[in-house]
Every structure is written in C-alpha cells, then in structure tokens.
Amino acid sequence: MDRKKLVLLLGALIIAIGTAFAARSIFAGGAAPDAEAAVPTGPRVLVAKRALTAGTIITADALGFQPWPKELVQDAYFIDGEADMNKLLGTVVRYPITAGEPVTQGSLVAPGDRGFLAAALGPGMRAVTVPVSAQSGVAGFVFPGDRVDVVLTQQVEGACDDCTLKTAETVLRNLRVLATDQTTEKTTDENGKTVVEQFSTVTLEVTPKIAEKIAVAQTIGTISLVLRSIADSQSELEKAVAAGDIQIPAGATPEEEEKMLKAAMARPLDKGTTFVTGGDVSRFQRSTVPPKTRQQETQVAAAQSAPRASGGGGAAAPVYTGPSVRVTRGKETTDTPVSAKANAGAVLSGQSSGVRRAGQTVPAAGMTVIN
C-alpha cells in the first residue's frame, strides 16, 4: 500500500471517530433530566390511611400524619404538634373519607357529642334500648363495643293451673352494644383501668326487623344478655361461608373480599336459635306444653262465636258452659246452672231433670223423676 492511500485511510478513520463522538454528545445532551418527586415542605396534617365509611370507629391504624403543601392547609385540618391523636381514638366518622384525604374536625364526632349515636350506626341499622338488671346484664361486664346474645325466658301456661312450661330461648345473636345507660364509652379510673359499673339499660345496634322482635319479646317474658367471645365472630363467619350464606364474587379483589367478610362478621343474626325447657334442667319439670282439654276448646269456641251485646259494639255477653240441671214442669223445660261440686245424686222432689256436661244431656244418677 502506497503512502497516499495510507494517509487517506487514517484521515477517514479520524473523521469517523469524530463523527461518532459528536453524535453521542448530541443525543446525551437532548435526554430529559431526571424527574424528582415534589415533596411538600408544609406542615404535617392528619389524613386517612384507608377509605373510611360513615360510622367507622377511629382506631390507631386508620389515621396518620403526612406533609401537606402550606398554601393548601385549612383551619379545619388536624396539624401535627397541635392535635392530640389519643383524643381522636374512639371517635366516629360522620361523612365518608377517601384514602389520603385530610381529616377535618367536622368529619369526626366524639362520644357524648350530639349525633354520636346516629353516626355510630351502620347503614340500614337501628338503635334499640332494653332494660336489664344486674343478673340479666352480666353484672355490669358489658361495655360499648362488645357483642351479646339475647335470651328470652318465659312461662307457657297449659290446660290446668299447675301445667306450666318453663323455657329459655336464644332469640338473637351477635348484637353490638352501642351504649350502657347514657354512656357510649368505657369508664376508666386514674390508672387507666376499666371501671365496672351497674346500669339499667343497654342500647343495641339491630336491623329494623330485629328491633320489632325485641319489642315483642319484652311483652312475652324476661330478656337477658349473654356476653359473646371475640373468637365467636370468626367461627360464625366460617359456618356461614361453609353453609353458602355468604357469596363472594369470583372477580372480587382482596380488599373487596375482606370488606364483605368484615360486614358478615358484624351482621346481627336471628336464625338458628336454640332453646331449653324445664325438663332439660330438672326431671320434675315439663318438657312440652300440655294440650287443652275438650271442654276448654269448647269454651274458647263459644266465647269467640258469642253475639255481642246490644247497644252497638258492646262486649260479648258471657256464656255459661259449666254443669247445669234441666228441669221440666209439664211442657216447660228450663236449664238451671249448678256448682261444679254439686252432688249429681241430689234428689229433686216433684221434678224431672238431668245433668248436662259439655253440651250433652245425661240422666242424673240417683235423681227421682215424678210426673
């Protein structure tokens, strides 16, 4: 290779290397600068860590402080260093709050404030108050937030005075306690320990249908509260899932599934109730209700079909259905009521008669008939 060709080859190589470096510099200079996240430099405000629906009771994991732009801070926000987080625990969300949204002072209602009980109720739920005693109220060991069962104790009257069936029945289960007397929160002493106090009424969270059942149950017998274990809600949930009472959509997200399961665990139950009778407790008590006698059934039917007294809407005239004596004088026959203890063998001189019982006329034994 001659010298001229070698010089041209080196020159072309130098030009190629220079062009490559120039192109690299152009592309590197045109690249976008690294984006840096804008971090607010304002005060830290209280925000919701998750979506909070109306009626949610605030816990420590529901809220948290987060930096917020200074120009967007409002007076209703809770500012770190100014708000006491411990005082917010136990309050109830009045309006729905989305995740990451600042919590305002008007969106929370504290126990004892006006409207707290209405805010604590879940959607579609009602509050009903029942009277209790030290015995029927678990000696004061029921506190707001606990869950209880309702037991109805009653005596069912039978056909006779001594035929009474004593029974107790669990009519409702898994009811949330909202308040005891006028208190919606636990009372603590100076050491922070819960104080057990006696109360005369308990307010429960129920559905409208269960509220009607409680109102009727109070007129039937005595209502008692039975405190439930915290672990019972999980077992009840497993039974409901196994029985197919809870249907979870196939495409549900884990968050939606958890929300549905929590709602199922908090649902009051009025099905699958149990009962015991006096015969289950003592061999000397009855286990079934004695049936009514034929005479009692006849009396009830006669009382229901008896015509009302004249005078427009008066009470039905009483109908005597006990034993009577039929007295015949010539062609005239009359019925005369007699005591149930009367001697059927009594002699009526100069009369012909018979004893009628339960609508039938039979000759009176030992009675003298004189024509």
Image: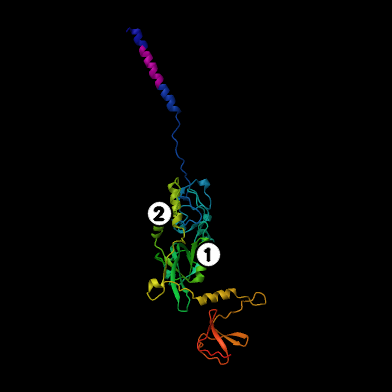
Q: Would you say 99 lies left or right of 309 here? A: left
Amino acid type shown at disc 2: Ala
Camera-nearest residue between 114 and 7: 114
* Magenta-highlighted residues: 9-20
Alpha carbon of mark 2 to alpha carbon of mark 1: how far?
29 Å
Quarter of the figure that contains the N terminus: top left
| Residue 20, x across and y down, in percent | 40, 21
Extreme front residue here?
371
- Badge 1 marks a residue whose secondary structure is helix
| Residue 306, x across and y down, in percent | 60, 75
Camera-nearest residue between 225 and 298: 298
Residue drawn at point x = 44 percent, y = 27 percent: 29
Q: How many marks?
A: 2
Which dot marks residue 183?
none
Question: Upstream in the sequence, badge 2 or badge 1?
Answer: 1
Camera-nearest residue between 182 and 287: 287
Quarter of the figure that contains the C terminus: bottom right
| Residue 22, x across and y down, in percent | 42, 22
Asked whether 14 falls inside the magenta stretch, the response is yes
Amino acid type shown at disc 1: Glu
190 shown above or below 164: above
Extreme right residue here?
311
Q: Nearer the viewer, mark 2 or mark 1?
A: 2
Which dot marks residue 242?
2
Q: On the image, numbered disc 1 is attached to which residue?
A: 212
14 shown above or below 198: above
Which of the 4 image quarters holds residue 277? bottom left
Extreme left residue here?
1
Camera-nearest residue between 43 and 24: 24
- Residue 63 seen anywhere in this rendered image of the structure: no
